[in-house]
Amino acid sequence: MTGRDMDDVTPDALDLSRYIREGDTVVWGQACAEPQTLTERLMQQRADIGHFRCFLGIPATDTVRPDHADLVSFVSYIGSGGNRALHRAGRLDVLPAPYSSLPGLLGAGPLRADVVLVQLPPPDGDGRYSPGLADDYLGAALRTARVVIAEVNDQVPYTYGPRTLGASDLDVVVRTSRPPAELRPGTPDSVTARVAARVAGLVDDGATLQFGVGALPEAVLGLLTDRRDLGIHSGLINDAAMDLIEAGVVTGARKTLDRGEAVAGLLMGTRRLFRFAHRNPAIQLRDTGYTHDPQTLAAQHQLVAINSAIEVDLSGQVNSELAGGRYIGAVGGAGDFLRGAARSPGGLPVVALPSTAGPASRVVARLSGPVSTSRSDAGLFVTEYGVADLRGQPLRVRRERMLAIAHPDHRAALEAALEEQGAPA
């Protein structure tokens, strides 16, 4: 932070070339936390700046497009949403890194942020700005960036957490009033609903939940309305989690840490979630260094980590990145959370997925993509056909249990593939 006098400008008067230099790396809040006025202006004014680099997170808008790559290079840890179009066009550099490494990379590493764009709510009575919709990996980038430009949007909720910003932390403020980007819940199909039901059956009263992005984790949360005293320690909070908090199912009463609070890095949902989170101390936003910290995760009471995958092999290796040669996922935080849940007293490291994608099996003899999570971190795998607990099991038992949860139409082919490979270690 420079600590110099803050510029207060209108959106129409904002000239980003005054603050962003050619060759800079620009980082902004992901998903619903995207400061859309700033990112739209950035793409519009790219010719005035020259060549620069942008680090992208989960997209919730179509602000960034392949044609912007004439002057902008894009790098991201994830290939979902609008990032898929960039990847198909050969305009996205993929960062195959665990989520927990992002603060170090953006704060002082090879992707160090020169300029950070943030979306904030108006300040409180003491002139302090809350993180709004995300703390996440932005905290590390904010601490070391040369320039911080804030879109202060009066439709962003004022949320709570240990980090706040003051006027001295901001170089430029642009005041707006527009709805934040939304990410609406997906609708699970019948197979996904069956998988979700099996996962939900693993969750006991008092468990602390971590869950990823997508229709499957949301469907699991929707089936937990009869539980008591659940907690949340996750990378995100979505509408389904909000419903559980509002219904009194999530109380955090049995959490070891942050008792009574739902902790996450960002809010990913709709305006209903944003209104619920506004000045609600039951929701606490923390940075990635805390949400993904291995000691914090291991200390949580009965941490149930619910993550998905593109495909899994018979030994417990997970590919959560590549499908059909296209980068559509991420290494993400699954490895961090699975290891944390494995060390948590009573915890459950869960990877859940439908057994097939179209005609193809998602339980495979050999992964078609990279190993995003190693077999040494294998825990419980869930499909619509059952639960395979691989914890502490040798390879032979793992293969038997994974075959039992594969689609029946594919089991013979999987066994044949094992024989052909000689069932290697």
Image: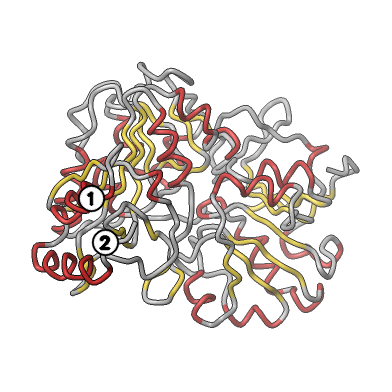
| Closer to us: 216 or 180 | 216
The residue tagged 1 is 396
Looking at the picture, does residue 223 appear above or below residue 246?
below
| Closer to us: 367 or 53 | 367
Task: Name the kind of residue labelled 2 in the image.
Answer: Ala
Q: Quick one: SS at disc 2? A: loop
Quarter the N terminus occupies = top right
| Closer to us: 375 or 45 | 375
- Counting from the top left corner in percent of width and height, residue 133 is at 54, 43
Dot 2 or dot 1: first in sequence order is 1
Q: How crowded is mark 2: few (under 14 residues within 10 Å), some or many (20 or more)?
A: some
Residue 325 in the figure: left or right of residue 77: left
- Most distant residue in the front direction: 422
- Counting from the top left corner in percent of width and height, residue 415 is at 16, 65
Looking at the picture, does residue 164 appear above or below residue 266?
above
Coloring scheme used: secondary structure
Q: Which residue is drawn at 29% across and 24% down?
A: 248
Give me the C-alpha separation between circle 2 and circle 1.
Answer: 9 Å
- Counting from the top left corner in percent of width and height, residue 23 is at 81, 68
Residue 423: which disc? Answer: 2
Task: Name the kind of residue labelled 1 in the image.
Answer: Arg
- Counting from the top left corner in percent of width and height, residue 422 is at 26, 66
Residue 214 in the figure: left or right of residue 264: left
Residue 56 in the figure: left or right of residue 368: right
| Closer to us: 108 or 125 | 108
Residue 9 in the figure: left or right of residue 64: right
Q: Residue at x 61, y 70 (%)?
A: 93
Q: Which residue is drawn at 79% across and 37% down?
A: 167
Q: Quick one: SS at disc 1? A: helix
